[in-house]
Every structure is written in C-alpha cells, then in structure tokens.
Image: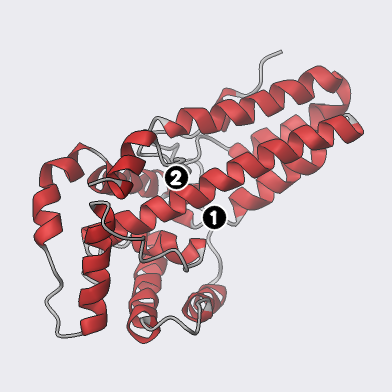
Amino acid sequence: MQLPKNTVFAKGQMPETLPVRRAPSVEKESQVKALESDRKPENSELSSLSLQLSAAAQRAAIRDSQLSRSELSALAARMLEKLTGASYSFSKSSYDNFLPDTDDRELLARAQQATDFANGRGPNPFTGLSSDQLSLITYDEGSDFTVNERRAARLELAGRRSEWSVYITQKMEGERQRTGGVEQGVREIIEYYRALPAMEESQILGNWEMDYRMMLSRYGEEGEAFDMSLIDLVAKQWKTEENSSSMPFDPTSDAIGQEGTKG
C-alpha cells in the first residue's frame, strides 16, 4: 500500500488550483485584536511590541488576501532563506551591527537582545509570545522588526512546531496501542493544520486536508498495517523538515540551533 505522496511539505511552488482559505474581513479584524491582547501583562515591552504586532497583523491580512497559495509559499521560502539560509550567513555581520532608527529604548534593547541571542550571548527575546505572534514577526517584511528579531522569532516558532510534532506522533502511537487505530490523531492533525497562519499553511504540499481525510476513509479497510504506516509517515515527515530551513515546521536543526546558542 502506498500512502499519498503529497502529505509532506514542499520547498517549491504550490498548485494554483489550491486556494488559500481566507476568513471574512470581520473575522480577520477580530484575529488582529486577539493577537494584540494575547500577551503577558508583566512584559515591560508590551506597549511598543503590541503596536508593532498590530501593524504586522494588518500587513499580513493585506498580503494574504492578495497572494495565491503558491505565491505565499514562494514568498515564505525567500523569507526563510534570508533568516536561516546562506543569505543570512553571508550578511550576518551587517545584521549584527544594525539597530533600529529610533529613540525608543525598549525597541533598541529588544533588537540588541535578538542580536545577542543570535551570537549565543543571551536568551531569545520572544519566548513569551504566542505561536501566531511569532509567525507574524517571522514573515513580516515591514521595517518594524530587525532581521535578527525575525530570526529569533523563527527559531522560537520552529521549536514550538517541533514540540508539537513529537506530541502528535506519540499521541498517535498511544492511540494505536489503546484502540488499534489512529483516527483521533489524524483529526487533530487536520485541525492543527487548518488553524495555521496562511503563510505557514501554504507551504504544506498539495491538498493535504483531502489526503488526510482519504486516509481516514481507508482506516477501516486496512487495519493495523495502515496505522503503523501513517505513524511512520508522520515521523518521517518531521525528519524531512528537520533538514530544510524552508519548511514551516522546521524543528530547529543542529546547524541553526547552534547559531542561536553558541558564539
């Protein structure tokens, strides 16, 4: 039995026939407000950061409504190359020396903290943010965030996605052992992917939701062998992503992780 091949993440172009799911404008406005309020009140940088996140959310809403799914995927690949690929290494010195043109001490301090983090001299300044906020910063092309800030957000987000991949793989294996199936785990994967920001969802190869629903429809026909193949597919999927800095769920690879933790 062969499982669908288009359930892994793509590096290249997405089919134009697959539109990005778009929420109505009213819902998008509520998402922006939620992103502004989804933060820790004790954080001293909240006032400045919340304004930046609000502006980034507005830019993301416009971008996501204007670009096709394949265009979003291609744009994401270019952005991630700048943040984690050879382009970053080539220009790292200039990124490390750059500071925002502002008198806001909080913004300057955060930008410097992101640079310190990139050189192994301090913690990630974005560990307290939600995954949606991290995604906003990572994929924002405005001038609010420095490259090192966007890189720091990317690495934190990658760690979150990596943790989830371990969680869902273990959950599916546990479900298989308890019930002989993995239906609940597959449904959770579908809901998780559907909730992703458009920029991240666009990087999943093919019509992933249809593929997973087809897996569910075959579940009763192929039994335990199918369950084990699916769990193995999910595990390999994350392993494949680990080797590519252009993937939305890149579990921070050793090479990237070392840059954020060593000088």
Q: Do residues under tags 1 and 2 come within 8 Å of each other at their CB atoms?
A: yes
Which residue lies under the disc numbered 2? 248
Residue beneath the point at 45% across and 48% down: 158
**Viewer can see residue 140:** yes
- Going by the image, does 88 lie left or right of 190? left
Q: Amino acid at mark 2?
A: Pro
Q: Earlier in the sequence, mark 1 or mark 2?
A: 1
Badge 1 element? loop
Residue kind at label 1, given as amino acid type: Leu
User: Badge 1: few (under 14), some or many (20 or more) residues near its Cα, within 10 Å?
Assistant: some
Say if residue 145 shows up in the picture. Answer: no
> Which corner quadrant of the image does residue 212 belong to?
top right
User: Local crowd at mark 2 within 10 Å, few (<14), some, or many (≥20)?
Assistant: many
Residue 196 marker:
1
Whole-percent x, y for residue 16 in the image? 43, 41
Quadrant of image for the N terminus = top right
Name the foreground residue: 185 vs 70.
185
In the picture shown, does residue 194 fall above or below 74?
A: below
Q: Secondary structure at mark 2?
A: loop
Residue at image point 19% right, 45% down: 88
The percent position of residue 106, horizontal first and vertical second, equals 26, 81
